[in-house]
Image (spheres, rainbow, N blue to C red):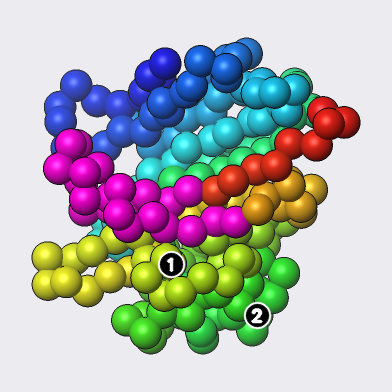
């Protein structure tokens, strides 16, 4: 099943989900066109509230960034299905360097450093503040991996960066086995849909209690 939320004009913005046959969709909520989409799903008894977000780029004007995080904060407010576990993922156009790790020890793990990133950009600071405010952990900084398993985006000059993140709270993090970039299937993925991003994957172990 494909669920998407974007514009008719291509290459502008858009978010979406591709769901397997065993995933039952309970509800879909559209927050900000082309930027923020939430689905409530059940899979093998596990209830998830998944939000897909696409942040403005680093060079976009501050008003766009303020609007994005304003609507993202609204999307985090739970008024129904309160037992569903929150999972927030997407392209946040944020780079986070070692200079920010010390102040956000409960948000970011030790798997963050990248040799190509020496300074946290503005989007990175906004993301860290948002995660700290909502008690979210950056899961792809928690599980230790090689550097090639961390970076999700490749610039035309070959420089690689981490721009994509999977954010969860502590309860759901306990069910995750790993979170990393897969490079081998990425080449086929890039050719198929024309993207310069790699695939970021996490495995969630569902206990029998669910």
Q: Is residue 149 left or right of residue 70?
A: left
- Chain-order first, disc 1 or disc 2: 2
Was residue 183 drawn as part of the magenta stretch in this picture? yes
Judge whether 173 appears above or below 40 on screen.
below
Distance from disc 1 to disc 2, alpha carbons, whole Å, reads: 21 Å
Q: Is residue 122 visible?
A: no
Per the image, label 1 sits on a secondary structure element best described as loop
Q: Quadrant of residue 100?
A: bottom right
- Closer to the camera in the image, 204 or 16: 204
The mark closer to the camera, 1 or 2, is 1
Of helix, strand and loop, which one carries label 2? helix
Residue 151 vs residue 193: left or right? right
Residue 12's tag is none
Picture residue at 36% right of the left edge, 80% below the top: 117
- Residue at 64% over, 30% down: 49
Density class for disc 2 (Cα within 10 Å; few <14, some 14-19, many ≥20) is few
Position of residue 165 measured from the top left corner of the image (x, y, whole percent): 48, 55
Q: Is residue 158 magenta?
A: no
Question: Image point 54% across, 61% down: which residue?
Answer: 140
Q: Nearer the viewer, residue 200 or 169?
A: 200
| Residue picked out by circle 2 | 103
Q: Which residue is mark 1?
A: 150
Look at the image and give the residue range highlighted in magenta.
Answer: 178-201
Drawn side of residue 135 relative to residue 141, left or right: right
């Amino acid at each position: 099943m494909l669920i998407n939320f974007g514009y008719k004009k291509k290459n502008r913005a858009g978010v979406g989900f591709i769901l397997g046959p065993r995933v039952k969709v309970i509800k879909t909520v559209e927050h900000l066109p082309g930027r923020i989409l939430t689905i409530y799903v059940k899979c093998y008894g596990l209830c998830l509230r998944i939000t897909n977000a696409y942040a403005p780029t680093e060079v976009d004007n501050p008003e766009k960034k303020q609007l994005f995080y304003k609507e993202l904060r609204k999307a985090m407010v739970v008024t129904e299905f309160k037992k569903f576990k929150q999972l927030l993922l997407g392209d946040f156009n944020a780079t986070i360097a070692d200079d920010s790790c010390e102040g956000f020890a409960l948000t970011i793990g030790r798997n963050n450093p990248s040799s190509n990133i020496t300074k946290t950009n503005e989007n990175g600071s906004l993301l860290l503040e948002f995660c700290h405010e909502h008690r979210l952990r950056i899961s792809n900084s928690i599980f230790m991996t090689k550097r090639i398993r961390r970076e999700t985006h490749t610039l035309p000059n070959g420089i690689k960066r981490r721009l994509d993140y999977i954010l969860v709270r502590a309860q759901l993090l306990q069910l995750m086995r790993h979170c990393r970039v897969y490079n081998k299937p990425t080449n086929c993925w890039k050719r198929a849909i024309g993207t310069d991003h790699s695939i970021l994957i996490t495995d969630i172990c569902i206990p029998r209690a669910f």
